[in-house]
Image (tube, rainbow, N blue to C red):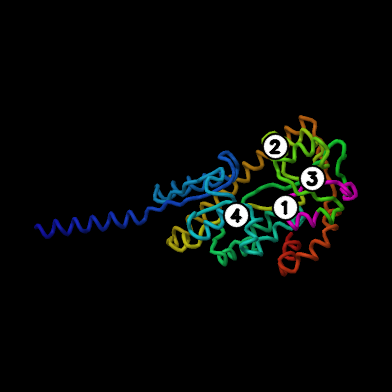
Amino acid sequence: MRRFVTSLFVLAALMVGVAAAQQITLKAADNQPEDYPTVQGLKFMANYLDAATNGRIKMEVFAGGQLGDERSTIEQVQLGVIDVVRTSTSPVGEFYAPMGVYSLPYIFRDAAHMWKVVQGPIGRELLDGLQQANLVGLAYYDSGSRNFYTTKAAGPIKSVADLKGKRIRTQQSEVVLDMMKALGAEPVPMAFGEVYSALQTGVIDGAENNFPSYGPQGVRHYEVAPYFTLDGHARVPEVVMISKSTWDKLSAADQALVREAALASVPVEMALWAQLSNTSRAEVVKAGSEIITVDTAEFQAAMKPVYDKYGSKYGDLIQRIVDTK
C-alpha cells in the first residue's frame, strides 16, 4: 500500500512538472505609447493567446520603448532576450536586406497595392526569409503613408516642379535624401523635435510625415504648415516578429497558435490606424489645413535615378512588386 501511495505522489509530481513546462510567457516590445494602434494590436494578440490556451500562453506587452528603441529591440529579439517585437520594416532591412525594398520611395501605388503585396506571396516570402537573421516574421501592420506638407510662405506642392529648391526636412536616411534630390528639393536632415520651430521661422519650407504625426495627436505641425500633399511617397509597413530561438522551443501546435494570434490582430490594428488617421485628417481640415491630391505617376517617374542606384540589391523584387495587381 505504501509503495502504491508513493507511486501516486511520484506520478502527481511528474504531472505537475509537465503542466509547469507547458506554461509559456512571452515578452513583447513596442516603442509606441500604450494607446497607439500597434501596441493595441499586440495586446489583442496577447488576449487572443490567453483565451485560446486558457491562460497557458501569456504575452506581456512592454510599450513606450521600455525595452529599447526599434534597433535595439530587434537585436534583443535576435538574441532571445525579448521574444516578440513590433517594428517598422525600415530598420529590419539592416538585418535582412530584402525587407528594405518596402522603404523605396513610391514602391507602392496606393494602400490597396501595398496590402496586396505584403499579404501575398512576396510578403510571405520576406517574412519567411527573416529566419536568416534569427527572426521569424509573423504578420504586417499598417503605418499609413508619409506625405509632404509645407508652410504658407512656401506654398502648396501640387507637382514635382513645386518641390524644386524647397528646403524639406528629412530623416537621416540615404535613400530619403536621394529621393528629395531626385524631386529637385533640398533635403535638410534635422532632429524631429526641432521641426516645428524651423517651419515657423522659415528655416525650412516643409517636412513629411503621416496624418497622426502632423495633426493634434502628434506634434501639431499643421499649425505652421497648412498645406498637406497626398503624394504617399513612403508606405513602409510595420512587422511583428518573434525570436527564432523562442520559436524553435515552441511545439508545432503552439507555433501555429502564435501565428494565428498575430494574423488575427492585423485587422484590429488596421481599423485602429484608420480611425486615428481619419480623425487627425478631419481635425486638421477643420483647423484650416488644405489637403492636396496629386498625380503620383509624375512623382514616381522622377525616381529613376534612385531605383538605378538601389535597385540591383533587390534582384527581381521591385519588378514583382510593380507587377502585382
* Labelled disc at residue 71: 4
Amino acid type, callout 1: Gln
Magenta part of the chain: 160-179
N-term-proximal mark, 2 vs 3: 3
N-term-proximal mark, 1 vs 4: 4
User: Gap in Å between the C-alphas at discs 2 and 3?
Assistant: 15 Å
What residue lies at 13% left-to-right and 59% top-to-bottom?
A: 4
Q: Which residue is mark 3?
A: 148
User: Gap in Å between the C-alphas at discs 4 and 3?
Assistant: 26 Å
Q: Which residue is mark 1?
A: 172
| Closer to us: 162 or 70 | 70
User: What is the secondary structure assignment of the residue under circle 3?
Assistant: strand
x, y (%) of residue 57? Answer: 42, 51
User: Gap in Å between the C-alphas at discs 2 and 4?
Assistant: 23 Å
Q: Which residue is mark 2?
A: 219
What residue lies at 75% left-to-right and 37% top-to-bottom?
A: 196
